[in-house]
Amino acid sequence: MTREEALELLKTHVTNKNLINHCLACEAIMRRLARHFGEDEEVWGLAGLLHDLDYDYTKDKPEEHGFKSVEILGDSVTEEIKNAILAHCEKKTPETLMERALYAVDPTSGFIVAAALIRPEKKLNVVDVPFLLNRFKEKGFAKGANREQMKSCENIGLTLEEFYALSLEAMKEIANEIGL
């Protein structure tokens, strides 16, 4: 599956623009991490882009989240991508580098968006890593962004500071596309 085909599939199955932007942000971060680790950016990017493909179908049935995406994708992507999708929502234990990366990336993109939206400018270009690290300590900030899941970046050999730096860099590259 090409990136264009994946994006079209995502837009066919996901109706919420913010969720599409979340998937685009996860794709960008996954691509940046792949580059950092010397992995395949296309494969990692597809995992990030497609990880919430089934959200419209499973938002009220979280026990099906991930499984429905794998069903929709069928044979159009590799088992590696399908396993990363299942791992991001805890339907399998994250084992590979890509699986562990997507698991950490998922809440991080929303956390970074929340950090941008509380700034008066509502733009990513005014967010920096120290700002993110300070907000990470605030339990009331972006409550939906699971801190332990973000901190699992250590399982891919990155400190939270390094992980935020790479994630923020990736999201800033697509800021216009995601409206930030």
Image: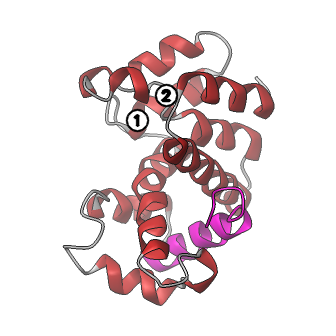
Report the predominant secondary structure element of the magenta stretch: helix
Tell me where residue 57 appears, x and y as whole percent: 39, 20
Mark 1 closeness class: few <14, some 14–19, many ≥20 residues within 10 Å: many
Residue visible at 55% across and 43% down?
A: 17
Residue visible at 41% across and 68% down?
A: 114
Q: Is residue 13 left or right of residue 31?
A: left
Span shown in magenta: 160-180
Residue marked by disc 1: 87
Q: Is residue 12 left or right of residue 4?
A: left
Residue marked by disc 2: 83
Mark carried by residue 156: none
Viewer-proximal residue, 45 or 20? 20
Tell me where residue 56 appears, x and y as whole percent: 42, 26
Q: Quadrant of residue 134?
A: bottom left
Reply yes or no: does residue 169 show up in magenta: yes
Compared with 104, 58 (above or below) is above
Q: Do tag 2 and tag 1 residues touch (Cβ < 8 Å)? A: yes
Residue 40 visible? The answer is no
Mark 2 closeness class: few <14, some 14–19, many ≥20 residues within 10 Å: many
Kind of residue indicated by mark 1: Ala
Looking at the image, what colour scheme do you see?
A: secondary structure
Kind of residue indicated by mark 2: Asn
Q: Is residue 138 left or right of residue 68?
A: left
Tell me where residue 135 appears, x and y as whole percent: 33, 81
Residue 157 visible? The answer is yes
Residue visible at 48% across and 32% down?
A: 85
Compared with 10, 57 (above or below) is above
